[in-house]
Amino acid sequence: MDLSLMQKRYHVTTFGCQMNEHDSERMKGMLESLDYRAAEEQADADVILFNTCSIRETADSRFVAHLGHAKRVKKERPETIIGVGGCWAQSLKDEVFQQFPFVDVAFGPGQVHKLAEFLTSDSLTAQGYFEFEGFAGDLPDKRTREHQGWVQISVGCNCNCSYCIVPQTRGRESSRPFDGVVREVERLAGEGVREVTLLGQNVNAYGRDLRDAGGPRTFAELLAAVDGVEGIERVRYTSPHPKDMKEDVILAHAQLASVCEHIHLPLQSGSTPILKAMRRTYNRERYLDRVALIREHVPDCAITTDIIVGFPGETEEDFQLTLDVCEQVGYDGAFTFVFSPRRGTEAALITEGLVPHEVKVERMERLVEVVQRRAHERAQRFVGRTMEVLVEGTSRTDPSRLRGRTRHNKAVNFTGLAQPGELVMVEIERATSQTLAGAESLLARAGAGVG
Ligand code: 5AD
Ligand code: SF4
């Protein structure tokens, strides 16, 4: 008899940010350690999980459509367990069960370990887990890419950005002990991981709250320790807050070999009055000053950003100031969001100066045009260079080619013979705003400092 037929199966659908992607990996790792295995389709799973997000309106509506499908599965097979985790679940709390009575378990972000508790308890009746605890502890994770790993370094956020639901859903900031982070990176390196991304809502505030053996630590110290781990060739992190972007962190990019030449520096708005209303605690000049410092120490650094258009009170003049920052900085890429009010946030209560939907859409189009044009122009600096690429697999559009990423976090499609996980040198021939194209160089050696 095939024992695998007796094994229970799970299916996880993830919405939203990298933090959620990572939480999903932890959920999968946890489920596998409980002897569950992955199901290809929701319909074949004994446990159907959704890891939700409430940052973007579109994720919400997509998610409700997905839940409809799970409801049908539950009707046909009532023993199926439906679980909803993540920020959206947290923002609704027990209302989840009123609105969606077929949901069995709901849990907030960082409560992944509670899912294990639930699945192993005797009574599988509807339960919600939403309390905030400090760091949820080490859980096994299941990596989607063998050579890239994510490491959570903190949970929660102490900022009060008026549009943002995260402080409510993820609670106060709590840093993971320094040695614990380093040990996890060492473990990953031992398993063949070459690139790690350190994750947190505000990574460069890391360590201020630590009271363990070493007392408070800085993010720059953590970068140095992770850089020192044998086998780790690339270190990335997301997201930092411009207010905490100190010179020591910028210098880490210049001085530590594995810290990549890419900084994601969320702008949100280029207008000081709007930044004030957003409670971002920096102004336009201070942001541009951070960019200047990055360019001084790491001239070739890729800079990407997050921008919100249509925040309440945003005038055409304010919006122009945002466009102007995009022109000046020349981002290598940007995530652009239309403001949408989030339940329980300060900005959701603003009734004056609301920006009509058509105006938001029209501003978004103009913003995307500037961002893409500048990204396209900036990307031309790579053409003709031979750059180090970490191979991820075959190209999505052309299976005869390979796909990978440069240290600047640009996706590259190229011809070559390399295997996933290898670092190779690629001669860049063409560049668009999003991707580079080229051919593997058989002469240059990766790690030889070219690029
Ligand atoms: N409306 C639009 N965009 C938002 N973001 C966060 N909250 C909102 C909101 N209410 C964006 C910010 C943040 C990114 C992850 O999501 O730009 O940096
Ligand atoms: Fe939200 Fe602001 Fe914290 Fe980022 S820094 S998670 S936008 S409150």
Image (tube, grey):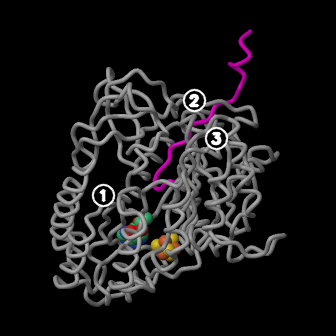
> Vertical placement of 405 versus 395: above or below?
below
Quadrant housing residue 398: top left
| Residue 376 falls left or right of residue 281 | left
Mark 1 is surrounded, within 10 Å at the Cα level, by few (under 14), some (14 to 19) or many (20 or more) other residues, namely many
| Closer-to-camera residue (293/210) | 293
Q: Nearer the viewer, mark 1 or mark 2?
A: 1
- What residue appears at the point 43 percent right and 48 percent down from the top-left corner? 407
| Residue 226 falls left or right of residue 367 | right
Local SS, label 3: loop
Query: Residue placed farthest to the top in the image?
Result: 1
| Closer-to-camera residue (196/300) | 300
Tell me residue 123's x, y (percent): 79, 48
Q: Find residue 332 and name its label.
A: 1
Question: Is the CB of the residue bearing disc 2 within 8 angstroms of ligand 1?
Answer: no
Q: Which residues are magenta?
A: 1-18
Type of the residue with mark 2 = Ala
- First reached walking from the N terminus: tag 1 or tag 2: 2
Type of the residue with mark 3 = Gly
Regarding residue 88, the answer to whether it shows in the image is yes
Residue carrying label 3: 231
> Vertical placement of 373 versus 367: above or below?
above
> Vertical placement of 214 versus 96: above or below?
below
Q: How many tags in the picture?
A: 3
- First reached walking from the N terminus: tag 3 or tag 1: 3
- First reached walking from the N terminus: tag 3 or tag 2: 2
Q: Nearer the viewer, mark 3 or mark 2?
A: 3
Type of the residue with mark 1 = Asp
Residue carrying label 2: 39
| CB atoms of marks 3 and 1 within 8 Å | no
- What residue appears at the point 59 percent right and 55 percent down from the top-left corner? 85
